[in-house]
Amino acid sequence: MSSAPTQPLAADIFVVVPAYNEASVIRGVVAGLLACARNVVVVDDGSHDATAAEARAAGATVLRHLINRGQGAALRTGMDYALAQGARVIVTFDSDGQHDPADLAALVGPVARGECEVALGSRFLGQTVDMPWVRRVVLRGGVWFTRLVSGIKISDTHNGLRAFSRHVAELIEIHQDQMAHASEILDELARRRVKFREVPVKIRYSGYSMGKGQSSLASIRIAIDFLMHKLRR
């Protein structure tokens, strides 16, 4: 990990971390975040292990779903909580250790300064470490899918590192409980003409994070789920 900033983010900036069966890594993820941010909210999405206990021991606020509902649902729960606590900016951050907490300041900065309403992390503008070529191909395919279906031109479509202004967090609708929420969020930004900016970030792949990630076949299912929802809307 890169070195953390000396001053933590402001108290009205909340980091939301959806987590499912991440007991082996969540303590380290939370510790890294708390070196950079005052408010870290872990949403334990019906885990069968000690994810909640580990996150709480590390210093996070922990919310729990009794059953596994999916990452989209966990994000919505965490964002609603952050809004109720008075959050001015809400950051979403994955729980598997791929993201670097040192990227938070650069991500939050333009939103906090009012230069844009959403900042989207991009590994393709930034840096990837040990990224398998198959994953690169799948993600590049996702970029073109998003451009075709939603008309939004970005370089990285399924990056869990994002920062939302309070206004946009209240405005966008996340109906997709599972992984299609990532495409749904981008579709919402395009539909509502939200001003956004991409920010270079670092993604570090490991055997653990790859094991937790989505397969190529799952990516096809995600695309189908998103398209079905878009057609019904």
Image (spheres, rainbow, N blue to C red):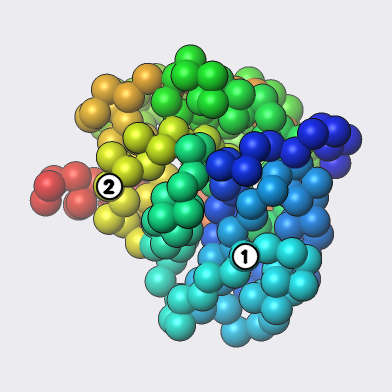
Asked if residue 1 lies left or right of residue 121, the reply is right
Asked if residue 4 lies left or right of residue 223, the reply is right
Where is residue 34 drawn, in percent x and y?
Answer: 75, 51
Visible residue check, residue 135: no
Callout 2: helix, strand or loop?
Answer: loop
Q: Nearer the viewer, residue 131 or 112?
A: 112
Which kind of residue does numbered mark 2 sit on? Glu
Asked if residue 22 lies left or right of residue 110, the reply is right
The nearer-to-camera label among 1 and 2 is 1
Where is residue 2 drawn, in percent x and y?
Answer: 85, 35
Q: Nearer the viewer, residue 211 or 201?
A: 201
Which kind of residue does numbered mark 1 sit on? Thr
Visible residue check, residue 233: yes
Disc 2 designates what residue?
173
Callout 1: helix, strand or loop?
Answer: strand
Pointer 2 local density, CA inside 10 Å: few below 14, some 14–19, many at least 20:
some
Question: Looking at the image, do the residues carrying marks 1 and 2 touch, with CB atoms under 8 Å apart?
Answer: no
Estimate the spatial distance between the alpha carbons at disc 1 and disc 2, rounded to whole Å. 24 Å
Residue 130 sits in quarter: top right
Q: Is the residue 98 above or below the residue 187 in the image?
A: below
| Identity of the residue furthest to the right in this view | 3
Residue drawn at (20%, 51%) of the image: 229
Residue drawn at (37%, 50%) of the image: 181
Whichever of labels 1 and 2 marks the residue nearer the N terminus, that label is: 1
Where is residue 151 drawn, in percent x and y?
Answer: 28, 23
Disc 1 designates what residue?
61
